[in-house]
Image: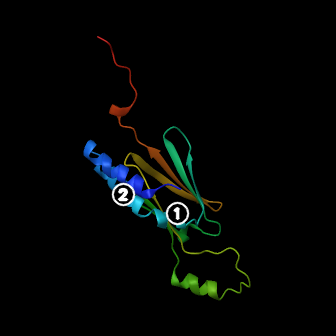
Amino acid sequence: MTDHKAIHSIFTGLKPFTVGFDDMFDHLDMVHNHIPHLTANNYPPYNIVKTGSLTYDIEVALAGYNKKDVQVTYENNMIKINSVKSKDEKEVEDNDGILHKGIAKRNFYKSFTIAEDIEVKGAELKDGLLRVSLEKIVPDHKKARTINIK
């Protein structure tokens, strides 16, 4: 198991030797402070898939959910995925005659910290799998190029 205090001190120790990484260190501090909360919640299950050299998908297993039951938001380099349930749906669930409910549509909340150079391209819910597509945007000045020798 990783010693979270040691990791935190490494980040803190690097701050005096870096320029322009303040936001990254702030995000790492936030993630560090939420590690117990983030690792305790494993529902719903998810994958993070590298689909190309600059593209990624976050896949979340949501059997029984449809588009109106799920909300995906992006703000301050955080993707937040959570369940949405109206009061009317709760009343229908309580009175719809189900004798055993093995497939529960329980409330959930997932968040992912996204690097500043990652762009959210869209989200799709199909066959019980929510897929949030992401792409790393590489500015022209950072792309590989050949330097002419004079």
Local packing at callout 1 (Cα closer than 10 Å; few below 14, some 14-19, many 20+) is: few
- Between the residue at mark 1 and the residue at mark 2, the CA separation in whole angstroms equals 16 Å
Pointer 2: what residue? 29
- The image quadrant of residue 26 is bottom left
Q: Nearer the viewer, residue 117 or 9?
A: 9
Rendered residue at 57%/65% (across/down): 42
Rendered residue at 63%/87% (across/down): 94
Q: Disc 2 on helix, strand or loop?
A: helix
Q: In the rendered structure, find residue 39 and report the number of the disc placed on it.
A: 1
Rendered residue at 42%/49% (across/down): 119
Rendered residue at 73%/82% (across/down): 100
Vertical relation: 17 (above or below) 58: above
Count of numbered marks: 2
Q: At which x and y percent is residue 39?
A: 52, 63
119 left or right, relative to 23? right
Q: At which x and y percent is residue 136?
A: 44, 43
Residue type pointed to by label 2: Asp
Vertical relation: 113 (above or below) 102: above
Q: Nearer the viewer, residue 23 or 70?
A: 23
58 left or right, relative to 23? right
Q: Nearer the viewer, residue 133 or 40?
A: 40
Residue type pointed to by label 1: Thr
Q: Disc 1 on helix, strand or loop?
A: helix
Q: At which x and y percent is residue 102?
A: 71, 76
Q: Nearer the viewer, residue 81 or 2?
A: 2
